[in-house]
Amino acid sequence: MEVLYRDDLHAHVGGLPHHFYKGWEWHKAFGYLLEAVAQARHSHACQEALTCIERALEILSKTTLTAKHNIAMQLFKWKGSMHYGLEQMAVAANTISLLFYG
């Protein structure tokens, strides 16, 4: 897919994480998921962002990234803000509390 859409990867970032996830290419799937999260957050597509964040957290648990803890913290912060955007205040508060209390 990267070769097929190399001239316009940004427009196809939604399908790339799934493609690499199914191929067990965790690092590539994770990178494209972060791009998909950024696009979804930017366009206020909270549910799409949450779906991508959940998949990113799942992949993060399978990898050996050096900054794993810091990345997880950022993902939980984004997750909380997306729940807040969906007016799911209790879930948002619970998610944000994980940042402080684990």
Image: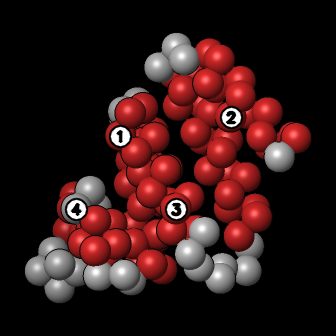
Q: Where is residue 27 shown, x and y percent of the image?
A: 48, 80
User: Which circle, 1 or 3, is nearer the viewer?
Assistant: 3
The reply to whether the C-beta atoms of the residues labelled 1 and 3 are less than 8 Å apart is no
Q: Nearer the viewer, residue 43 or 60?
A: 60
Mark 1 to mark 3: distance in Å? 16 Å
Q: Which residue is mark 4?
A: 15
Determine the CA span between mark 4 and mark 2.
27 Å
Residue farthest left in this picture: 4
Q: Which residue matches tag 1?
A: 48
Q: Quadrant of residue 66?
A: bottom right
- Mark 1 or 4 closer to N-term? 4
For mark 2, what is the residue? 95
Q: Are marks 3 and 4 in contact (CB under 8 Å)?
A: no
Q: Looking at numbered disc 4 in the image, what kind of residue is underneath it?
A: Gly
The answer to whether residue 22 is left or right of residue 77 is: left
Viewer-nearest residue: 46 or 3: 46
Amino acid at dot 3: Glu
- Height in image: 40 above or below 12? above
Q: Indicate which label's residue lies in the foreground, 3 or 4.
A: 3
| Marks 4,2: beta carbons within 8 A | no
Mark 2 to mark 1: distance in Å?
A: 17 Å
Tell which circle, 3 or 4, labels the residue nearer the N-terminal end: 4
Q: Earlier in the sequence, mark 1 or mark 3?
A: 1
Could you say whether the residue bearing mark 1 is in a helix, strand or loop? helix
